[in-house]
Image (cartoon, grey):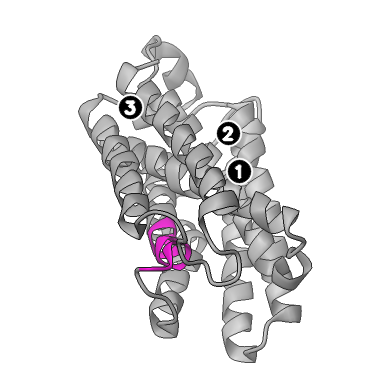
Amino acid sequence: MNLLILTSIILSVILGVGRMVDLALLTDAETGLCVVGSVWLRYAALAVAILLAVAAGRATKPEARKLCSPCKPSGVMAILGAVWIVLAGVAKIFLGSAPLAKGIWGALAICCGGWLCTLGRGWLQKNWKRPADSLTEVVLGSALFYWCVLARFMENSSSWHRVAPTVVVWQMLAALVFLSVLGRALSLPDTADSRTLCASGLTVWALCLCWEFPQLLDTLLRGGVLARLPDFFFGLGLCCIGVLGGICAVRATRTESGRKSARHSVG
């Protein structure tokens, strides 16, 4: 594995461990405000992890075409992510408060889940096949995260002093970029931006897995799952996307013969 990629992955895991300690001991559970240390230390840690992820992805020489081949870990993570996101959409429809907003969110979640399921099935098949001949499905599959960014800005309910709601926007943007570039890489591999794919994959590993998982664990331990069921399911889906991002970054940069990848790719 490339040293920069490995360093980025390890640093993101350390970020996750630090976030777990922060939530348990240094952050008020009711308000989400930091009770020990400056809030800017949290942002500094996030900035270091994200900048290293982007730098590692841009500095290496990944090949997006290497993803156009069967891969069980990628397939399993994509399908698990699809399941959790669809469950989040269904839960949002039945448990949400605003009928129009929850309907749009639920429909987009189902589209996203369908797209991830298509990717997962392709990776789990013995003979990999291109998931789509156009980018329409890619746009529909990633539109959920675009909507989440817009919704977060329209709510305008957070400040810089509450880290979690602010980082949600970063998570949604990272997932949006990653799924968009991944969809292009799999549908039109000759036009893919491999370095952006690798950088965004490492970024979602940091934000959607290593940052999100401690928050889900904290919610579970505090018994707040039922009160936030759609968000909890969606968080699990984000974690799966984060794992998928890390796998894709590693696969795109690993050293191997180009023949194996070419045999499974579809021209």
Amino acid type of the residue that numbered disc 2 sits on in the rendered structure: Ser
Q: Which residues are magenta?
A: 161-172
Dot 1 falls on a residue whose secondary structure is helix
- Residue 222 colored in magenta in the image: no
Tell me which residue sits at (47%, 66%) in the image: 33
The number of callouts visible is 3
What residue does disc 1 label?
78
Q: CA distance from mark 3 to mark 2?
A: 16 Å
Q: CA distance from mark 3 to mark 1?
A: 20 Å
- Residue 162 colored in magenta in the image: yes
Tell me which residue sits at (74%, 72%) in the image: 227
**Residue 88 x, y percent position in the rendering:** 68, 65
What residue does disc 2 label?
74
Tell me which residue sits at (56%, 50%) in the image: 25
Q: Is residue 182 above or below residue 138?
A: above
**66 on left or right of 109:** left
**Residue 113 x, y percent position in the rendering:** 62, 57
Q: CA distance from mark 1 to mark 2?
A: 6 Å
Q: Is residue 258 above or below residue 43?
A: above
Q: Quadrant of the N terminus?
A: top left
| Residue in the foreground of this view, choosing between 207 and 150 | 207
What residue does disc 3 label?
63
Amino acid type of the residue that numbered disc 3 sits on in the rendered structure: Glu
| Residue in the foreground of this view, choosing between 47 and 173 | 47
Q: Quadrant of the C terminus?
A: top left
**209 on left or right of 48:** right
Dot 3 falls on a residue whose secondary structure is loop
| Residue in the foreground of this view, choosing between 158 and 71 | 158
Q: Do residues under tags 1 and 2 come within 8 Å of each other at their CB atoms? A: yes
User: Magenta span: helix, strand or loop, mainly?
Assistant: helix
Crowding near pointer 3: few (<14 within 10 Å), some, many (20+)?
many
Amino acid type of the residue that numbered disc 1 sits on in the rendered structure: Ala
